[in-house]
Structures are given as C-alpha cells and as structure tokens.
Image: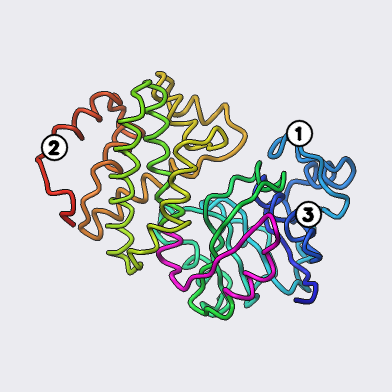
C-alpha cells in the first residue's frame, strides 16, 4: 500500500507505540497533543518519558499541538482515553469530520453508556463504513520495543478492515480482521473490569486457583453482556476477548491490574488514582458495565462486586464471599 499521512490523536504510550509501527511501515504518521511541553520533548529529545519510559523514539516520530495539521490527513488514529474523546474533539475543534477513523482506545462513555464508535458517529459524523476499531492484547511498552504482537481490526466494512490490516501489519505486528465492531469494542472495554478484580486477587495473594476462576467467569460475563448488545459470541474467544483478558489480568504493564492490586493491599481508590500519571480505563468502565448490565437485564456478578468495591467501599474479601456463596448454577446457564 502506498504511504499514507496519518494523524494520531493523543501522544500517550499507545499513540506513540502505534506511531512507531506506522512509521516503520513507511507511512507519514505524527502525533497530535494539546500538551505543548510533551510535543516539544518528543521533537527535541525523542523520548516520551512519562508514558514510555526508557524507550528512545525513532527520528521519524514527531508531535504537534497544531490541530490544523490534521486537515490533510488520509486517516485519523484515535488514542485519547474514552472519557475525554468527546470534549477533546469539541474543545480543540479537531478538523476530522467525515475522515476515515481507526480507534485504538478502549472503554465505554460513562454518562451516555455509548461505545467509542457511537461517540465518533455523533461528534464527527464518522461513517460506519470508514470506522475501524484496532484492539487486542497489546501493551504499548512491548509494541514500542517491537515485541511480536497480534491484534484485530474490526469494521462493519470488511474491506476497510482489510485496508487497515495492510497499513499496520509487519513482521512484529500482525493484524487480523473482523466485522464485529460491537464485540471487539465490548471485549476491549470489559476486560479492564475483570483486570481490576485480578489485581485485587494479586493484592490479597489469593493464588492461581482464584485467578483462573476469575478469568473464566469474567469471560462469561463479558460474553453475556456483549451478546445482549449485538456482538457475535465467538468474538470473545478471540484476541479482543480472551487474548486481551489474559494479558491484562496478568501483566506488570496493566494499569488496571495495578489499581486492583493496590486496592487489595488496602489503599483507597482516590489515593491510587492521584498517584498515577496514566489513566486506568477500567475504573470508569466498571461504572458503565454495571449500568449496562441493568439496562440489558444481564446478570454480571463480578462487575457488580467490583462496582461495590470501587464506589461503595465494600471490602474485597466481603465481595469475594458474596460471589462464592451465590446460588448454585449450571456452568452454561446463559
């Protein structure tokens, strides 16, 4: 495919890592950020020390805070955290209306309970045929160091998904294609809720049996809610479901698992968040998942207990006891 000019909205770890992938593939990809100091540091020193520490960026990676630079882009890649997408587009008048969009963020907007694709359809009149979600087990720290990674590109227009597959793929970053946007968005979002629970288990030092039970039953919850919202249940056995769930529940790089671990060790949520530079999307997604479960009449006991721990100060061990003493069920009851 011919070189493409790609504007990456957001200069955090994920946006920077994907910029490295795209420039390695011969495309003209640059970072847009509202943070003038961050743009200056990236351009002058070729580092992004707050979001990708100890990674020297290629000379080809550049950053700007000039929104007009997005006007002549062939493709827009979003990496802004979910809860800030709508306000960033509006407050900085980003000129991306009707442009092809690839979304690399994960989450559900708390106030509206909308998926990221729906946010873009509303804010910039993005066409479903020109929207792709790029998701899967892919920590920025490892992608930036060119460790072998596989993800999935999902679009209602499989031809567009295939084009994105070609733009991003190389011998260290393999992209599969899918037409299940709902499933891929929900898998990438809900796994962060389960990762919070995994961190709590780690903080409490409850062992492998507990973690395995959590991942298995967490996947069941993800599939139940996603299917109720129109997803293909098979999607949750793939990269955006099981794959992302495994890596996020176990990795030292996972911010959501870290937040849960600190809670398991007795810290309060507000204190943990204040001490973090990066955003743990799972906190807000827990709130969204809890309300989506109610809206769609889907039983989500793990998400409900994580909600109670985060927002109602329920003790983790009490929440675990509640889960373990629920009415007995057949394993395949949904």
What residue is disc 3 on?
Answer: 65
Q: Which mark is residue 153?
A: none
Q: Is residue 209 left or right of residue 128?
A: left
Q: Is residue 239 left or right of residue 6?
A: left
User: Residue 218, position in %: x, y?
Assistant: 32, 45
Residue at position x 11%, y 46% in the image: 329
User: Residue 54, which numbered label?
Assistant: 1
In the foreground, 137 or 258:
137
Q: Is residue 173 above or below residue 200?
A: below
Residue, disc 2:
326
Q: Hey, which residue is sitting farthest front in the picture?
A: 171
| Mark nearer the N terminus (1 vs 3) | 1
Residue 8: image location, x then y, percent? 70, 59
Q: Which residues are magenta?
A: 161-186
Q: Residues within 10 Å of mark 2 (few under 14, many from 20)?
A: few
The CA span between labels 2 and 3 is 52 Å
């Amino acid at each position: 495919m011919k070189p493409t000019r790609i504007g990456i909205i957001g200069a955090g770890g994920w946006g920077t890592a994907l910029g490295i992938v795209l420039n390695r593939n011969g495309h003209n990809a640059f970072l847009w950020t509202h943070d003038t100091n961050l743009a200056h540091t990236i351009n002058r020193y070729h580092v992004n020390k707050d979001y990708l520490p100890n990674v020297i960026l290629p000379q080809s990676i550049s950053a700007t805070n000039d929104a007009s630079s997005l006007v002549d882009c062939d493709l827009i890649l979003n990496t802004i955290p979910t809860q800030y997408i709508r306000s960033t587009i509006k407050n900085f008048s980003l000129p991306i209306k009707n442009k092809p969009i690839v979304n690399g963020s994960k989450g559900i907007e708390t106030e509206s309970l909308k998926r990221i694709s729906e946010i873009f359809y509303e804010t910039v009149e993005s066409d479903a045929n020109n929207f792709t979600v790029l998701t899967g087990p892919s920590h920025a720290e490892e992608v930036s160091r060119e460790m072998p990674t596989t993800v999935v590109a999902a679009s209602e227009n499989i031809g567009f998904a295939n084009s994105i597959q070609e733009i991003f793929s190389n011998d260290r970053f393999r992209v599969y294609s899918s037409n299940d946007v709902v499933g891929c968005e929900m898998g990438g979002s809900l796994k962060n809720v389960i990762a919070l629970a995994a961190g709590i288990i780690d903080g409490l030092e409850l062992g492998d049996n507990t973690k395995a039970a959590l991942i298995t039953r967490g996947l069941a919850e993800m599939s139940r809610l996603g299917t109720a919202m129109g997803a293909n249940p098979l999607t949750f056995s793939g990269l955006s479901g099981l794959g992302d769930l495994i890596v996020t529940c176990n990795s030292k790089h996972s911010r959501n698992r870290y937040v849960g671990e600190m809670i398991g060790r007795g810290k309060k949520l507000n204190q943990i968040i204040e001490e973090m530079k990066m955003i743990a999307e799972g906190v807000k997604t827990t709130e969204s998942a809890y309300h989506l479960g109610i809206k769609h009449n889907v039983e989500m006991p793990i998400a409900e207990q994580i909600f109670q721990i985060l927002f109602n100060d329920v003790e983790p061990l009490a929440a675990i006891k509640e889960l373990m003493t629920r009415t007995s069920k057949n394993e395949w009851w949904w």
